[in-house]
Image (cartoon, rainbow, N blue to C red):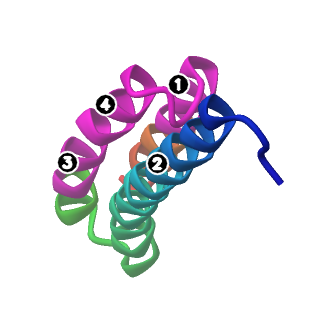
Amino acid sequence: MANTSSAKKMVRKIARRTEVNKSRRSRVRSFVRKVEEAIASGDKKAAAEAFKGAQPELHRAVTKGVIKKETAARKLSRLSSRIKKLA
């Protein structure tokens, strides 16, 4: 348990930040899931559209510090290669 007032304030700040990051991470997962569902259905056009929506979300998560740059690059690369295979 936090003893000092500054430690108590940090606990509150961390709790707020955790909530924000949780929602951001959830948002990214939703966009990625939409792409994966479109790939699974075999619809290349829908998958490409969903990918265009997921791309900025992943980059935004990187700038906000929710995920690392390499993680976003890896996810985007794997999704785009799967979309290309749909041809």
Q: Is mark 3 on a helix, strand or loop?
A: helix
The label on residue 21 is: 2
Boundaries of the magenta span: 49-77
The label on residue 73 is: 1
Q: Give the CA distance from mark 2 to mark 4.
A: 12 Å
Q: As rendered, which of 45 and 37 lies closer to the eye?
A: 37
Q: Nearer the viewer, mark 1 or mark 2?
A: 2
Q: Main secondary structure of the magenta part?
A: helix
The label on residue 53 is: 3
Determine whether 31 is above or below 14 in the image: below
First reached walking from the N terminus: tag 3 or tag 4: 3
Q: In this view, does 61 lie to the left or right of 3?
A: left
Q: Give the CA distance from mark 1 to mark 3.
A: 15 Å
Q: As rendered, which of 45 and 30 lies closer to the eye?
A: 30
First reached walking from the N terminus: tag 2 or tag 4: 2
How many residues crowd around disc 1 within 10 Å: few (fewer than 14), some, or many (20 or more)? some
